[in-house]
Image (spheres, rainbow, N blue to C red):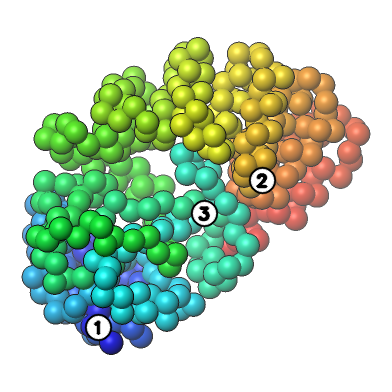
Amino acid sequence: MPSISLCMVVRNEEKLIAQAICSVKPIVDEIVVVDTGSTDQTRLIAKRLGAKVVKHKWKNSDGEARNVYLRHAGGKWILVLDADERVSAIDLPRLRKLTQNKNVAAYIMPMRNYTRTHNLLREWRVLRGKYPKEEKFSRCPGFSTTYPTAFRLFRKDLGVQYDEAHTFHTYYMKFSRDSKRNIKYCSVPIHHFEFLKGRKFISAKQGRYLKLEQTYADSAKDNPWAYFNIGISLYGLKQDKKALVYLKKAIQVDNKFDMAYCLLGMVYRELGLYAQAVKSLKKAIVLNSRYADAWAVLGAVFEAQGKLNKAKDALRKAIQLNSDHVVARNMLGIVYERQGLLRHAQKQYRKAVVLNPFFTEARYNLADLRSKSTFYPSLFRVLKNAGPNKYL
């Protein structure tokens, strides 16, 4: 059986690092932890769990830090996790089996990002008990799926190196041998619990990496993801006009970048530029007709324009493609309410709250509707029965 080295780059992760290491400890042969300056118990916890801890001074390069663990790892395969991630015990046998395929150089592993908020770029789905331990640990009602740009499981003997010019969001890997034809997708997910670190951490992370991303984009003019990542960060920081500049650059490099068109539509909507928003969102849908998030945002733009029938059609399409789309359901409720169809509105608000009890806007809309009408006297029951305590 090929040996596996678990490799990590960490800093002040005492709350989560143990769960990450323990999740894969039964199948790995060694653990290499690169610590970039922890001031808490992170290093001690890692050592107690059998890790080789290497101190490394942070130099604003995630790629450089990751190359450190490559120099210290002795396994034939490298498995990369962050402290706020884990692999489910259910999937460990399958993960181990993947390393037996001699014809594969690396695997792209899906990321299950647990969250209480709907990400309008990556379809949010309700938890349905597929991974009971991880879902309970997350304290969230749902997740979205992404595919990291860097490989998380790969063979070391291919001369892998991280590009040290790349930042956290955009670092890439280079092989000394041509192995691209041997890269495969796998169905074993990495469970990501960044939400547990809190909004303050996430906001600080966005600001911290923005400058690094901008520096990288200056040297990677042919990489649309570099510009797109900056656009995401700027949008998250409510710097919409600046976000437009980078999203347009992303599309100039790749005019089939459906996610960039969708985000561009979202930014235009925030700026009140509805005609441009519709154009961008329709382009995203032409590129990907099953893009539920693009349909949902398009419906929201039509609602803002007062085109309520068009809004209903777009929002219903979003829900048809993703029945868990709480944003589309809430917006459809708003459209129904504007048309005086209160029972229909109530049904959509209620469904959104049941799907995600933490969706504040839908909860407010449902309560506000009750205050305006008497047709459904027990509307507040859904708020009580699906309250946050269910997940805490």
Q: Which amino acid does label 3 sit on?
A: Phe
Residue found 70% across the figure and 50% down from its top: 354
**Labels 1 and 2: the sequence-earlier one:** 1
Q: In this view, does 342 lie above or below 354?
A: above
**Labels 3 and 1: the sequence-earlier one:** 1
Q: Left or right? Give the position of 234 relative to 57.
A: right
The crowding category of the residue bearing disc 1, from other C-alpha atoms within 10 Å (few below 14, some 14 to 19, many at least 20), is: some
Mark sitting on residue 21: none
The residue lying toward the viewer, choosing from 345 and 175, is 175
Residue found 11% across the figure and 46% down from its top: 165
Q: How far apart are marks 1 and 2 (CA)?
A: 42 Å
Mark sitting on residue 2: 1
Look at discs 2 and 3 and give the one toward the viewer.
Answer: 2
Q: What residue type is labelled 1?
A: Pro
Q: Is mark 2 on a helix, strand or loop?
A: loop
Q: Mark 2 points at which residue?
A: 323
Q: Left or right? Give the position of 87 relative to 380.
A: left
Q: Left or right? Give the position of 286 relative to 126.
A: left
Q: Quadrant of the N terminus?
A: bottom left
Q: Name the residue under label 3.
A: 143
The crowding category of the residue bearing disc 2, from other C-alpha atoms within 10 Å (few below 14, some 14 to 19, many at least 20), is: some
